[in-house]
Amino acid sequence: MNSDPFDGYLRRLGVTALGGPSVEGLFALQRAHLERVPYENVDIRLGRPPGIDPALSVRRFTAGRGGYCFHLNGAFAALLESLGYEVTRHLGGVSADAESRGVRGDHLVLTVRAGGEEFWVDAGLGDMGPHEPLPLRAGTYERNGFTYRLERLDPLEGEGPGWSFFPSAGGARRMNFRDAPARTADFENMHAWLSTDEESPFVRTFAVFRRDAEGTDGLRGRVLTRTERGERTQERVLSGPEELFAVLGGLFGRNLDDLGPADRAALWAGVERTHEAWLERQRADAEPARD
């Protein structure tokens, strides 16, 4: 890639002047990425999942769109390398089970060296990751009312050692990753499943997230939430398609120029279907048990 796509990418992040690689620069870039490039699955929900080649993701972000971890961290790694940072990609796995030690390969993890230290860097964890990089050292980290923990992960059969990350808020309980380096090609099969299979959460559920210093804005289906200091402070149901697209383009900063009338109608219809199915599950769970 020549410098032009990266120039546009940096403009999207609101970063126009950087010196050489530094801890301060790395932190500023992750903060900007989380605040300005949303975690979103709009195109997957429309049945046209974008590939995970970093050059493609850089162009998408320059055009005002977002993506999920393979897009977000894949492009971010390429940007950091273009700026002179030493970046390593790793196979990761996100789990709702806090005891899980496996690495499924459904998350792309980055570690970056800056200022003589190694950091865990992540722009693609949606509502569970920190706003800034964490030192790649075992310990508990308090950040703006959120608590995070990093622990060494012992090897399992067929897998080498790695790390486990535990968040205090978000849709999952744990993320594991292995020390061994990975390549973009190592994620292609999982991306194909995540972006096309009917059982994939990205196919079944519409989700958008944006992280800032104080907390996370999240949209799951029609339910818009705000979480701060590990606690949900706001929650409301969007009234209709007009509000959905206003929130997408406003709060989440997702450029909507690629969505024509048919796309918008299809996206809203899918969101409405999954919202109704969610309400039905809520009603069923609330019904008293019968003998």
Image (cartoon, grey):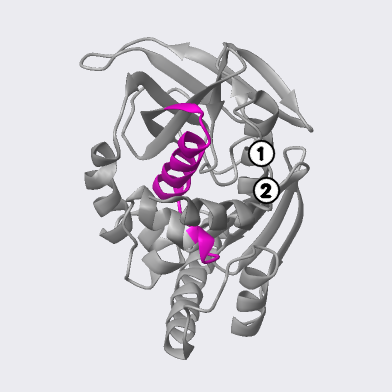
Q: Is residue 152 above or below residue 12?
A: above
Q: Residue at x 47, y 86 (%)?
A: 260
**Residue type at tag 1:** Leu
Where is residue 180 drawn, in percent x and y? 32, 19
Q: Find the magenta span and give its range.
A: 61-87
Q: Is residue 196 left or right of residue 165?
A: left
Residue underneath mark 1? 18
Where is residue 262 drawn, in percent x and y? 42, 88
Mark 1: which secondary structure? loop
Q: Nearer the viewer, residue 82 or 256?
A: 82
Q: Nearer the viewer, residue 126 or 291?
A: 126
Where is residue 222 drawn, in percent x and y? 59, 69
Mark 2: which secondary structure? loop
| Number of residue marks | 2
Disc 1: CA contacts within 10 A as few (<14), some (14-19) or many (>=20)? few
Residue underneath mark 2? 15
Marks 1,2: beta carbons within 8 A: yes
| Quarter-of-image position of residue 69 | top left
